[in-house]
């Protein structure tokens, strides 16, 4: 199975070129202030920082994918990080904006559907409410399917030097041609991403289950949190879920916030470097470059 073979390739590449983890560290440092503020339960500031990370992370993603591309063929260096990040930044940022537009369109659709279901339910129209709920589930499935289809656009922007629209459409074509193996790839990334998020989300779950939230913690910084992770298309994946569970009403003390933020930075460094390397290895094993597609079309 190509997902397993690509996994082996990615782990071998990371063991041969641990410098890739410096790229992961760069990403972790970019999102660290936002995650620390989220864990502290400080309102508004994380949302403002998320806007900043939205425009910074495409550079880091492109740089790490560029390093992974070189490392898969031999050695790589930080020069590849800066060169690729600079060269592919604009196209990846534009592709990220396309993804954000898709997510925004689905968000509006969910909101409209929720309002319709609310009005129908308030009027006693039980059947209409059930129909609205069914449509909501269907819309959620479609949304997940779209994200599944376009997930490789950051890699395609770098590996194939594709433009933003071509990267999105090529990702759809690539996934459609490799549905089963891509499902295997996605399962691996989701499971490992969940494990990476476990230290922070597990601690949050422990605090909720034991009821040790709020004022019983010495020196609480605050409750509540603005949900959300780094900008769309950043490729951070499942560790962002830790943000949703971090400081919301947990009343974390300052040492706890610092400790969890540092743990999150470590897990983000490891998982981000792994995911970009794995995605690059998987795409190169199953996809074709622009030159190969052009030659194939000419033949």
Image: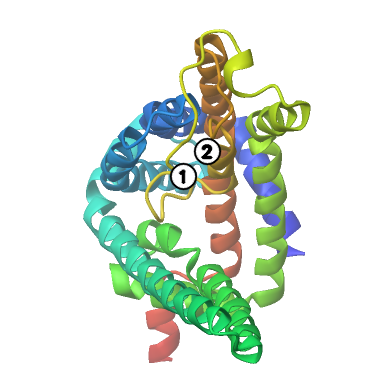
Residue at point 23% right, 50% down? 87
User: Residue 3 versus residue 37: which sits nearer the camera?
Assistant: 37
Mark 2 Cα within 10 Å, few/some/many (few <14, many 20+)? many
Residue at point 47% right, 72% down? 171
Q: Which picture quadrant has residue 216?
A: top right
Residue at point 45% right, 85% down? 296
Can you say whether 216 is above or below 269 in the image? above
Residue 53 image position (x, y, % from top left) = 32, 41
Looking at the image, residue 17 sits to the left or right of residue 190; the answer is left
Q: Which picture quadrant has residue 177?
A: bottom right
Residue 37 image position (x, y, % from top left) = 41, 27
- The residue that label 2 is drawn on is 243
Asked whether disc 2 touches disc 1, contact meaning CB atoms under 8 Å apart, the reply is yes
Tell me the quadrant of the picture where the N terminus can be found: bottom right
The secondary structure type at the circle numbered 2 is helix
- The residue that label 1 is drawn on is 227
User: Residue 299 versus residue 206: which sits nearer the camera?
Assistant: 206
Can you say whether 117 is above or below 10 in the image? below
């Amino acid at each position: 199975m190509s997902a397993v073979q690509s996994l082996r390739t990615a782990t071998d590449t990371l063991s041969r070129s641990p410098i890739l983890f410096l790229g992961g560290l760069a990403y972790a440092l970019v999102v660290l202030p936002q995650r620390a503020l989220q864990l502290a339960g400080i309102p508004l500031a994380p949302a403002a920082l998320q806007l900043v990370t939205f425009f910074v992370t495409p550079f880091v993603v492109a740089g790490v994918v560029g390093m992974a591309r070189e490392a898969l063929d031999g050695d790589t260096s930080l020069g590849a990080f800066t060169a690729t990040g600079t060269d592919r930044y604009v196209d990846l940022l534009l592709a990220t904006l396309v993804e954000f537009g898709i997510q925004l369109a689905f968000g509006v659709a969910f909101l409209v559907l929720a309002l319709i279901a609310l009005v129908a339910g308030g009027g006693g129209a039980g059947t209409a409410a059930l129909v609205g709920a069914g449509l909501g589930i269907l819309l959620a499935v479609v949304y997940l399917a779209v994200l599944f289809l376009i997930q490789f656009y950051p890699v395609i922007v770098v590996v194939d030097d594709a433009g933003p629209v071509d990267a999105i459409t090529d990702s759809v074509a690539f996934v459609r041609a490799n549905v089963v193996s891509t499902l295997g790839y996605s399962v691996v990334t989701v499971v490992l991403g969940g494990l990476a998020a476990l230290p922070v989300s597990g601690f949050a779950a422990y605090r909720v289950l034991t009821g040790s939230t709020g004022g019983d913690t010495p020196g609480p910084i605050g409750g509540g949190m603005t949900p959300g992770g780094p900008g769309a298309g950043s490729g951070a994946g499942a560790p962002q879920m830790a943000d949703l569970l971090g400081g919301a009403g947990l009343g974390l003390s300052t040492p706890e916030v610092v400790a969890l933020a540092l743990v999150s930075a470590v897990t983000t460094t490891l998982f981000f470097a792994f995911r970009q390397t794995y995605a690059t290895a998987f795409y190169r094993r199953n996809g074709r470059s622009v030159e190969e597609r052009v030659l194939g079309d000419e033949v």
